[in-house]
Image (cartoon, helix red, strand yellow):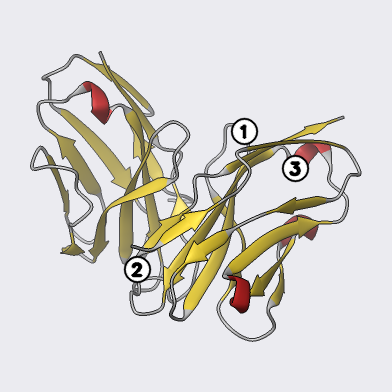
Amino acid sequence: AQSVSQHNHHVILSEAASLELGCNYSYGGTVNLFWYVQYPGQHLQLLLKYFSGDPLVKGIKGFEAEFIKSKFSFNLRKPSVQWSDTAEYFCAVNAKDSNYQLIWGAGTKLIIKP
Amino acid sequence: GAGVSQSPSNKVTEKGKDVELRCDPISGHTALYWYRQSLGQGLEFLIYFQGNSAPDKSGLPSDRFSAERTGGSVSTLTIQRTQQEDSAVYLCASSLAPGLDTGELFFGEGSRLTVL
């Protein structure tokens, strides 16, 4: 069965630190990849997505993610985090042979200390 | 509406009672999804609607769960004879195009269900 693994359930960083959140998936075929974010008290929203082309994708608020096909990974990065980045981050994968089914990771709670 | 609206935002019920959760998607969005999020878990797919049809109900955990969508708009998720393991946040999402063609789901804020 397809699965998505997010390695860290909780991450605590100080402001200005660099961030990398891991995401690995298990599926041998072609995929679309997503990162969603949920800020405290808000709904889930799309941070960035990869469908095809340049494996380095840029999203909102200075986030980026790199798709490494050989490693089945789609890690999220930000060079310098801010207190306002405190949120829960979810990685999700869509196998291209299903046009609606998203498989979600368990999420990573990120806390930024001011 | 401006966003996906879900009601109630919180529901506390006794074991064995029926509950109904409502989702009002963004106007014009043809695709609608229900997910369940339990504490510390990722989102669990429940059901997908394209228009009023539900081509995939495979995620519904048991026959106590049912969902419908009318007029290509509002959807209702019904849980009969609730059990404590049904306690979770139920999330609704909609998207403009069929399936994930646009890649973006728009989520509501969820309905938190607590079964005592």
Give the mark count.
3
Q: Residue at x 75, y 53 (%)?
A: A20
User: Which one is earlier in the sequence, the residue at label 3 or at label 2?
Assistant: 3
Q: Distance between the residues labelled 1 and 3?
A: 10 Å
The kind of residue tagged 2 is: Tyr
User: Which one is earlier in the sequence, the residue at label 1 or at label 3?
Assistant: 1
* Tag 3 near tag 2, CB within 8 Å: no
Q: Is mark 2 on a helix, strand or loop?
A: loop
Q: How far apart are marks 2 and 1 (CA)?
A: 27 Å
Kindly identify which numbered label has been placed on residue A40.
1
The one of A70 and B73 positioned closer to us in this rendering: A70
Q: Is mark 3 on a helix, strand or loop?
A: helix
User: Which one is earlier in the sequence, the residue at label 2 or at label 1?
Assistant: 1
Q: Position of residue A44 (x, y in %)?
A: 53, 47
The one of B17 and A4 positioned closer to us in this rendering: A4
Q: Mark 3 lies on which chain?
A: A
The kind of residue tagged 3 is: Asp
Instruction: Residue under label 2, please give it.
Output: A100
Q: Residue at x 19, y 14 (%)?
A: B14
Instruction: Residue under label 3, please give it.
Output: A85
Q: Distance between the residues labelled 3 and 2?
A: 29 Å
Q: Mark 1 lies on which chain?
A: A
Q: Which residue is drawn at 79% across and 50% down?
A: A19
Q: Relative to residue B31, is residue A7 drawn left or right?
A: right
Q: Is residue B91 above or below residue A40?
A: below
